Structure formats: structure tokens, C-alpha cells
Image (cartoon, rainbow, N blue to C red):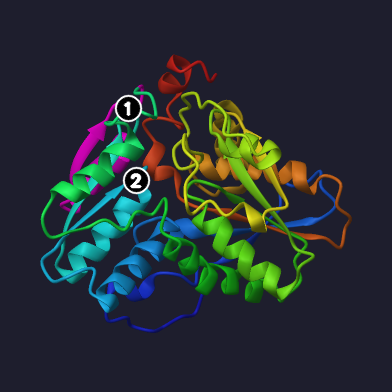
């Protein structure tokens, strides 16, 4: 890279992440697979994009005022991005997180001055103190509080429609057969998918879900099934949420914790790229999507965050053994 620009703020560094061709982990495929390295955003994930966008749109229309508290429920990455934005813009930040949050994410959030409230992952989704129910109630109770609500706010999708989608299209020179992206809130795959379909309706948009989430069954049957616990951070949900745009999807591939974690380890060992578990799930799904494609086909995957947030979990043998993953 030969970018010699000097930026006025860390927020100006968000986006324009590199795309690299994968060579070793795809050696049995005939097609080409390229990875968008979103963990090279300044706070380490694709969520930096929505953090800046959600805050700036709310500032512009008056929902967010100087000195306000920003409150969000997050698997860690959105909270990290919002924490970074809050520091730069002078806001306070509080995050509601699951009690399965990795130590590295929790420590990073604390370092940014983010106040954490942990919720019990074992609670039934309908429980008033469950992950998706607690935060909206808290937002109503706290004065001078802005709740972006990344799970139901389509401004989330719009951030990726405006930035990530165009970047992928430009980096692939407008030649793309399929894109494979994890589905957590659904904002990334929804926004990117909507942009790519507008450029070329033939591009296949594939979302990646985790076993235990309700997204896959709903996409295939229209029925919201019963969720069950899973370990993977950043994918899936126990509720049908507003940012999950199924209209742009051609398919959803559901991946187990085990397959996601072992693929993340493979990516490190075979490509030298250190990614998190959701990226492992995306790669596992992408190999399925790409296996029947010909030599002229081009597939893009999105690696949402990096391995440094999971050194005590996915990349720790003792943790993997304890969780029955080895």
C-alpha cells in the first residue's frame, strides 16, 4: 500500500479495507476466492462503518445531542466501534453484552471507557432481561440516551450500501459471481447485497448463519423456530430483527460452532490471516458455495474481525477442549 495521506481523525481511517486473493485454503477449487479484510478497520472490525454512520446521522437529525449517553447491545464489535466514535466526539458509552463475551473484547471496551452490563445468555428470549429485551427498556429509563438499535435500524444496512458494497464492486472490477457474508444483525449482507444486486442482479448473495439461530429456518420456511445456545460471537439471533433483510438473499448456509472455529484456525495456519470465528464460518460456507463453480468464476468473502479478540477462546486449546470442540 502506498497511501501517504495524513488523516485528521482516526474516524477518517474507517473503510477502504484491502481485498486479497486466497491461495492455499482454496487450492481444491477451480474458481478464485477473494477476502475483504474488514479487521483492518481502526477498531478492528466491519462494525466501525456502522458506528460512525449511526452516530453522524443521529447528530444531523438531532436525535443525539452533545454530552448524551450512547447505549447499544452488542456482541462486542459494534460497541467497540461506538466506543471509539464516542471518544472522538465526546459522548459517554454504555454497552449491554452477553456473558459469553470474550475477555479480549471486554478488556478492549473497558480500555475505551465503555461501561459494560452483562446479561445472562441462558435466559429465554422472551424474558424481560434477555439480551434483546433488556436494552430497549434501559434506553427508555435513562435520561439523555441515544439507542442506535443496530438490530432494527436500517441505517445499519445503509452504511454498508454506501461504503462496503461499492468498495467490493470496485475492487472486483465489476466481475463478481457470488459474495458470502456473515449474518449477525444482517446489516452488512443486506446493505452489500442490495448494492451488488443493483449493479448486477446475477450476483449470488449468500448469508452465513450459525446453528442455534432462527435465521436459516425462517429464510427457508417462513417459520420462526426455537433458538438454542451457541458459542460463536457475531452471527445469528434468537429473534427476527428489523435489519435482517431476506429479500436480497439467494441462500443462507448454516455453520456449526465447531466448523467455524476450526476453519478460523485453518485460515491462520494456511493463509497467515488471523480472523475470528465468524470469518471461519464464512470461509466454511464459501468453500461449499464455490465448489461447483468454474475457473472463470470469482467469489468474494468478508472477514469481519480478527483473531486477537478470541485468543482466550477459539485459539486456546484448553478452552476448545473444555467446550467439546477438539
Contact flag, marks 1 and 2 (Cβ < 8 Å): no
Q: Position of residue 81 (x, y in %)?
A: 32, 58
Q: Which residue occupies the extreme right position in the image?
A: 294
> Can residue 13 be found in the magenta stretch?
no
Magenta segment boundaries in residue numbering: 102-122
Tell me which residue sits at (74%, 47%) in the image.
26
Real-space CA distance between mark 1 and mark 2, rounded to the nearest whole angstrom: 18 Å
User: Does the image show residue 269?
Assistant: no
Query: How many C-alpha atoms fall within 10 Å of the one at disc 1: few (<14), some, or many (≥20)?
Result: few
In the image, residue 168 sits, relative to residue 268, either above or below, namely: below
Q: Position of residue 212 (x, y in %)?
A: 54, 28
Q: Position of residue 286 (x, y in %)?
A: 70, 46
Q: Nearer the viewer, residue 132 or 99?
A: 132
Q: Which residue occupies the extreme bottom position in the image?
A: 5
Rendered image: mark on residue 74: 2
Q: Nearer the viewer, residue 141 or 318?
A: 141
Tell me which residue sits at (42%, 55%) in the image.
45
Mark 2: secondary structure? loop
Q: Earlier in the sequence, mark 1 or mark 2?
A: 2
Query: What residue would you read off at disc 1?
Result: 127
Mark 1: secondary structure? loop
Q: Quadrant of residue 156?
A: bottom left
Q: Nearer the viewer, residue 40 or 246?
A: 246
In the image, residue 100 sits, relative to residue 321, either above or below, namely: below
> Can residue 112 be found in the magenta stretch?
yes
Q: Quadrant of residue 167?
A: bottom right
Amino acid at each position: 500500500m502506498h497511501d501517504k495521506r495524513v488523516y485528521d481523525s482516526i474516524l477518517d481511517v474507517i473503510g477502504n479495507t484491502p481485498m486479497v486473493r486466497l491461495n492455499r485454503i482454496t487450492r481444491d477449487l477451480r474458481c478464485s476466492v477473494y477476502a475483504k479484510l474488514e479487521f483492518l478497520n481502526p477498531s478492528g472490525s466491519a462494525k466501525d462503518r456502522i458506528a460512525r454512520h449511526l452516530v453522524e446521522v443521529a447528530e444531523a437529525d438531532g436525535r443525539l445531542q452533545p454530552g448524551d449517553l450512547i447505549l447499544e447491545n452488542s456482541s462486542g464489535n459494534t460497541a467497540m466501534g461506538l466506543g471509539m466514535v464516542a471518544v472522538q466526539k465526546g459522548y459517554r458509552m454504555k454497552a449491554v453484552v452477553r456473558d459469553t463475551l470474550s475477555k479480549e473484547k471486554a478488556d478492549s471496551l473497558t480500555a475505551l471507557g465503555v461501561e459494560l452490563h452483562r446479561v445472562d445468555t441462558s435466559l429465554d428470549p422472551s424474558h424481560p432481561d434477555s439480551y434483546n429485551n433488556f436494552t430497549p427498556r434501559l434506553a427508555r429509563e435513562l435520561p439523555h440516551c441515544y439507542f442506535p438499535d443496530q438490530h432494527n435500524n436500517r441505517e445499519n444496512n445503509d452504511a454498508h450500501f454506501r461504503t462496503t458494497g461499492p468498495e467490493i464492486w470496485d475492487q472486483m472490477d465489476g466481475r463478481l459471481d457470488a459474495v458470502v457474508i456473515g449474518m449477525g444483525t444482517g446489516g452488512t449482507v443486506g446493505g452489500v447485497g442490495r448494492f451488488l444486486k443493483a449493479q448486477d442482479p446475477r450476483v449470488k448473495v449468500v448469508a452465513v448463519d450459525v446453528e442455534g439461530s432462527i435465521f436459516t429456518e425462517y429464510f427457508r420456511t417462513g417459520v420462526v423456530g426455537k433458538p438454542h445456545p451457541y458459542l460463536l460471537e457475531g452471527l445469528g439471533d434468537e429473534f427476527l430483527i428489523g435489519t435482517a433483510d431476506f429479500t436480497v438473499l439467494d441462500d443462507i448456509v448454516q455453520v456449526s460452532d465447531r466448523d467455524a472455529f476450526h476453519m478460523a484456525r485453518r485460515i491462520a495456519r494456511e493463509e497467515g490471516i488471523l480472523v475470528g470465528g465468524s470469518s471461519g464460518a464464512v470461509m466454511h460456507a464459501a468453500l461449499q458455495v464455490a465448489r461447483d463453480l468454474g475457473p472463470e468464476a470469482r467469489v468474494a468473502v468478508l472477514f469481519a474481525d480478527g483473531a486477537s479478540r478470541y485468543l482466550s477462546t477459539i485459539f486456546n486449546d484448553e478452552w476448545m477442549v473444555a467446550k467439546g470442540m477438539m
